[in-house]
Amino acid sequence: MSDSISEKPNRAEEVSGDLDQFCIAGHTFQSRLILGSGKYDSFEVMRESFEVAETQCVTIAVRREKLHDSSGRNILDFVDPSRLVLLPNTAGCYDAETAVRCAKMGREILRGLENPGADWVKLEVLGDSRSLLPDPIELLKATEVLVKEGFQVLCYSSDDPIVARRLKDAGATSVMPAGSPIGSGLGVINRNSLQIILEDLKHGDPDYPVIIDAGVGTASDVAVAMELGFDAVLLNTAVARAEDPIRMAEAMKHGVKAGRLAYQSGRIPMSRYASASSPEVGVISKRQH
Amino acid sequence: MIDVTINGKKQSCGEGLTIAELLDSLGMNSRAIAVEINQQIQPRDTHCQVEVNDGDILEIVTLVGGG
């Protein structure tokens, strides 16, 4: 065994600098930061956070229209569907059947808005409300149905490599494993499983988009995810509930860029022992070792 | 009058109303909503033809902030 405790990651063969972009369902993104639109104190802070983050894709939820709405303000008045891809989610669904219905409702609303994300869905099928972790069996069922119905299915998944592979095999446009539970701020917990997922899903298919979704708390978590080789990071709470969401949005933008550049640069292997940075010949000390 | 359930709440409405007419009577902005009747999505271009029937269960949804 060598002292090395980490293999060099499989980095992208081609590094294209400013033109570094990635693709979901034929749509090209320059920004690798996807933001959620929930939990902001106001629509104004949300909009400003999106602008500062330079995000190009934003998730939204489908909910019952209030029968007697006092404010009359809709989120669509604060996001520009011509500039942002709106990605409707199925948050709050606990079985495949409800998630499929929810996805169809989101598509129906977005179809009227000429948004590239109209046929897209961030598919969440949850197991319980405490962990908000996915129910993999219902998730797979819903994926199969929605793929048949012509959706581009972006699956919020657990960090289980076998589940991730099954979702891709079922036709998921992207698999999006959680770094840690939604809104937990625990960051990237299971690097090893996530690396297996990346290796597996990108094997022979390097452009297949794999996105880390949920759990990040701060910019360093985002950088870690990007250093592992994820194509993008999807987050919400870490920005929306930060003391200063707009400043955190900027931090996240830099975290994504830093992590991406580091991934492309090919990090040094980790070693248990030191490796001197200064020449070992010509030292004036007489002491050895 | 007929009885329908809209977003989980029982209500009465006029007989023979189309979805579009019902939405008008509820004062709902039709731009950013989707309608489901008895768990079947009702595409926007059918709202002027499809009538709401006694006992129908409707879901009328919109977009909100979410992650």
Image (spheres, helix red, strand yellow):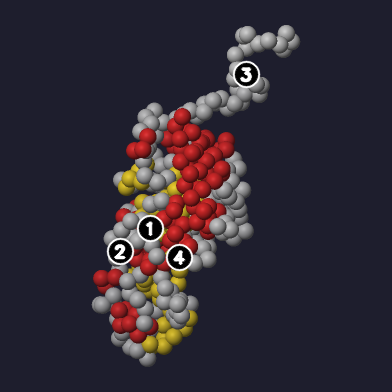
Q: Amino acid at mark 3?
A: Ala
Q: Earlier in the sequence, mark 3 or mark 1?
A: 1
- Reading the image, the residue beneath label 4 is A44
Label 1's element? strand
Q: Residue furthest front?
A: A284
Q: Amino acid at mark 4?
A: Glu
Q: CA distance from mark 2 to mark 3?
A: 59 Å
Q: Residue A183 vs residue A261: left or right?
A: right
Q: Nearer the viewer, residue A1 or A280?
A: A280
**Circle 3/circle 1 CB separation < 8 Å:** no
- Reading the image, the residue beneath label 1 is A86
**Circle 4/circle 2 CB separation < 8 Å:** no
Label 2's element? loop
Q: Position of residue A274 (x, y in %)?
A: 65, 21
Q: Position of residue A267 (x, y in %)?
A: 52, 28
Give the residue displayed 54% in from the left and 46% down from the top. Answer: A219
Q: Residue furthest right?
A: A287
Q: CA distance from mark 4 to mark 1?
A: 17 Å
Q: Position of residue A170 (x, y in %)?
A: 41, 45
Q: Please state the chain letter of the residue tagged with numbered disc 2 in the rendered image.
A: A
Q: Position of residue B66 (x, y in %)?
A: 48, 61
Foreground label between 3 and 1: 3
Residues at discs 4 and 2 both on one chain: yes
Q: Nearer the viewer, residue A83 or A288?
A: A288
Give the residue displayed 43% in from the left and 56% down from the top. Answer: A50
Q: Residue furthest bottom?
A: B1
Is residue A284 placed above or below A170 in the rendered structure? above
Q: Tag 3: Cα neighbours inside 10 Å, few (<14), some, or many (≥20)?
A: few
Query: What numbered label is drawn on residue A113?
Result: 2
Q: Tag 4: Cα neighbours inside 10 Å, few (<14), some, or many (≥20)?
A: few
Q: Please state the chain letter of the residue tagged with numbered disc 3 in the rendered image.
A: A
